[in-house]
Every structure is written in structure tokens, then in C-alpha cells.
Image (cartoon, helix red, strand yellow):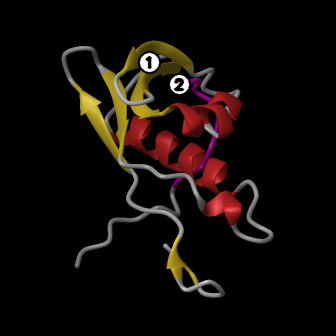
Amino acid sequence: MHSKEKMKQISRTLIFSHETFSNSLYVSKFYPEIYKELHCKYLSAACFYMMAHHAVKLFDLCDNCCVNLETDVTVYDKFYSRLNEFDFKINYNRPSERVCLKGRYRDLFFNTDMITDHLN
């Protein structure tokens, strides 16, 4: 996603994977920077929340399944630690100011039918 006003990249790809061995959700390559834009404070959280619900339904995961990801310590402090619905905690520290997080998905009614596949 690009900021039209600032002409720079403000967010990148959001990828959810199904960890079949643990039957959990793994999040990779999400840079929640949309909140830096004017009038978009909660858009990164809304996008993450909506896509997580969609992925859980798509992978047929259960309520209370684990959600795992790796991120920078500052991104955890400013973003993931504030996503109360997922209750992310630092599972362990990694080198270079990185942390692995573990949270829980809670099954709430949330309609994600508006999300469709986009083929190139």
C-alpha cells in the first residue's frame, strides 16, 4: 500500500500460513505502518483482525488456536501488544532486537465474505 500524499510505501504484504503440525496460524511479512497515516490510526489493526479471521476460516482452524509470528521489539511494543483480542506475548527473544510472539485466536462472529481471491 502506498500513501498518495507522501508518495511512499506505508505497508507491505500480509501473509498467513497454516502450521499443520501444530494446527496453528503463522503470520509473516506484515509491517503495520498504515496507522502512521492521517485519519488511519486503527487501520493496521482492522486489516490484521479481518485477515486473521479470514485465514482461520480458510484453514478451518479452531477457536483458541495459536497465532505465532516474529517481529521487531519496537513493532511489538507499538502494535502487537495493543491487539488485546489476540493477547500476544513474547514467547522468546531472537537476535537483533527481534522477538517471537504467541497469541490466541478467539472465535467471534466476524463476517469476512467481502474478502475475495484476486488473481493477477
**What numbered label is drawn on residue 65?**
1
Between the C-alphas of marks 1 and 2, the distance is 5 Å
Q: Which x, y percent locates residue 9?
A: 48, 73
Q: How many labels does the image show?
A: 2
Q: What's the residue at 65%, 51% (across, down)? A: 46
Q: Nearer the viewer, residue 76 or 1?
A: 76
- The residue carrying mark 2 is 105
Residue type at tag 1: Cys
Circles 1 and 2: CB atoms closer than 8 Å: yes
Q: Earlier in the sequence, mark 1 or mark 2?
A: 1
Q: In which quarter of the image is residue 61?
A: top left
Residue 75 is covered by the magenta coloring: no
Q: How crowded is mark 1: few (under 14 residues within 10 Å), some or many (20 or more)?
A: some
Specify the principal SS of the magenta part: loop
Q: Which x, y percent locates residue 73?
A: 53, 31
Q: Nearer the viewer, residue 9 or 95?
A: 95
- Magenta segment: 105-112
- Horizontal side of 33 relative to 120 (left or right) equals right
Residue type at tag 2: Tyr
Q: What's the residue at 42%, 62% (across, down)? A: 12
Q: Nearer the viewer, residue 48 or 106?
A: 48
